Image: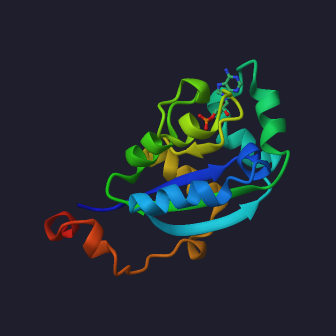
Amino acid sequence: MKPEKTVVLIKPDGIQRGLIGSIIHRFEQKGLKLVGLKMIYMTDEILDDWYAHHKDKSFFTHLKKFMQQTPIVAMVWQGLEAIETVRKIAGVTKARAAEAGSLRGDFGMSIQLNLIHASDSADGAKKEMELIFKKSEIYDYYSITDQLIYSRDELAD
Ligand code: CMP
C-alpha cells in the first residue's frame, strides 16, 4: 500500500491559543510522519484559490480575514490512508459538535474558529501542497519507527 500525503493548517485561533505543540503532538502520537512544515501568511491570492468552493458563501469575507489574523502553521503529514485518518483526528467542521477525542472536539467551540484545516481528498491535498510548498520543502525520509507502526505486508507495495 502506498502512503498518502495530506495538508494540515493550524489556523490563527490555534496559533493564538498556544495549541501548536498539542496539535502536532496528536498527529505524531498517532503514528503519522511529518514530511513538511512551515509558518506563512495566507495571502489573498492563496486564500481565493484555497477556498474557491466557498467564494459565494456568506462567511467567505470573514473567513479570509480570520485566516489572515496571524501567520498559520502549514504541515504535510504522511501515512497509509492519511487523508481520512487526519480528518478523523480533526473532527467535524463545527467544533462544538465534534466528537470528544478529536482535536476540534477537545479544543474548540466554533464553526469558523475550528483550529485546523485538513485536506478532504487526494486531489485537494495535491492542490494544497502546490499552493504552499515547493517540491524541495517536502521530505521523503526513512523513519525507523515505520516498522513499529505498520506491519511488513502493509508497507509492501
Ligand atoms: P475548513 O473545513 O477547514 O474549511 C472551510 C472553512 O470555512 C471551515 O474550516 C471553517 O473555518 C469555515 N466555515 C465553514 N462553515 C462556516 C460557517 N457556516 N460560518 C463560518 N465559517 C465557516
**Residue drawn at (60%, 44%), measured in percent from left and top?**
117
**Residue drawn at (66%, 42%), measured in percent from left and top?**
115
Query: Is the residue 37 above or below the residue 92 in the image?
Result: below
Q: How is the image coloured?
A: rainbow
Counting the numbered discs, the total is 0
Residue farthest along the left direction in this orientation: 153
**Residue drawn at (66%, 29%), measured in percent from left and top?**
109
**Residue drawn at (78%, 47%), measured in percent from left and top?**
45
Tell which of 56 and 21 is nearer to you. 21
Q: Is residue 22 left or right of residue 157?
A: right
Tell which of 54 and 15 is nearer to you. 15
Ligand 1, by image quadrant, is top right
Determine if residue 46 is in view: yes
> How far from the left and from the top, in percent, is residue 81?
33, 51
Picture quarter containing residue 40?
Answer: bottom right
Q: Is residue 122 left or right of residue 55?
A: left
> How far from the left and from the top, in percent, is residue 2?
28, 62
Quadrant of the image for the C terminus? bottom left
Q: Is residue 122 left or right of residue 11?
A: left
Determine if residue 130 is in view: no
Query: Is the residue 127 above or below the residue 38 in the image?
Result: above
> How far from the left and from the top, in percent, is residue 123?
46, 46
